[in-house]
Amino acid sequence: LIFHQEFNDIEQAIYFEKKIKKWSAQKKRALAYEDFDMLQILSECRNMTHSKYKPTAEEVSSTLNQINNLN
């Protein structure tokens, strides 16, 4: 056991457990080691259509090539 959290309400505990079960191992590790900066980075959306994500021209080209190769 490398992480624990105390809750006053059992429903909050169940909600939190279900939520983190879907997380990647990296996000769980960042939470366990209280690396909240890394947790924030790992939690950011990296979808190319997301307004905060600014892909490079190379990333856009690579993604478009991958899409074209599917057809």
Image (cartoon, rainbow, N blue to C red):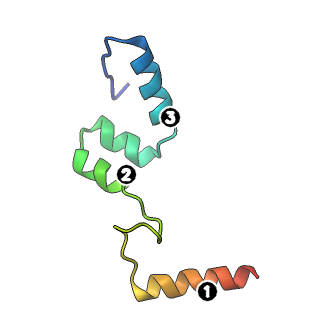
- Amino acid at pointer 2: Ser
Which of the 4 image quadrants contains residue 3? top left
- Mark-to-mark CA distance, 2 and 1: 27 Å
20 and 11: which one is in front?
Answer: 11
The residue that appears at 31% across and 48% down in the rendered structure is: 39
- Name the spot of residue 50 as percent of width and height, x first: 42, 66
| Residue in the picture at 29% in, 51% down | 40
Gap between marks 3 and 2 measured at Cα:
14 Å
Quick one: label 2 or label 1, which is nearer the N terminus? 2
N-terminal-most mark, 3 or 2 = 3
Reading the chain from its start, which is encountered first: label 3 or label 1?
A: 3
| Badge 1 amino acid | Asn
- Mark 3 touches mark 1? (CB < 8 Å): no
Q: Secondary structure at mark 2?
A: helix
Question: Which label is found at residue 65?
Answer: 1
Q: Residue at x 54, y 84 (%)?
A: 62
Badge 3 marks a residue whose secondary structure is: helix
Query: Label 3: few (<14), some or many (≥20) within 10 Å?
Result: few
Alpha-carbon span between mark 3 and mark 1: 34 Å
Mark 1 residue crowding within 10 angstroms, few (<14) / some (14–19) / many (20+): few
Q: Is residue 24 above or below residue 7?
A: below
Residue at image mark 2: 43
Q: Is residue 47 left or right of residue 64?
A: left
Residue nearest the viewer, comparing 49 with 29:
49
The secondary element bearing badge 1 is classed as helix
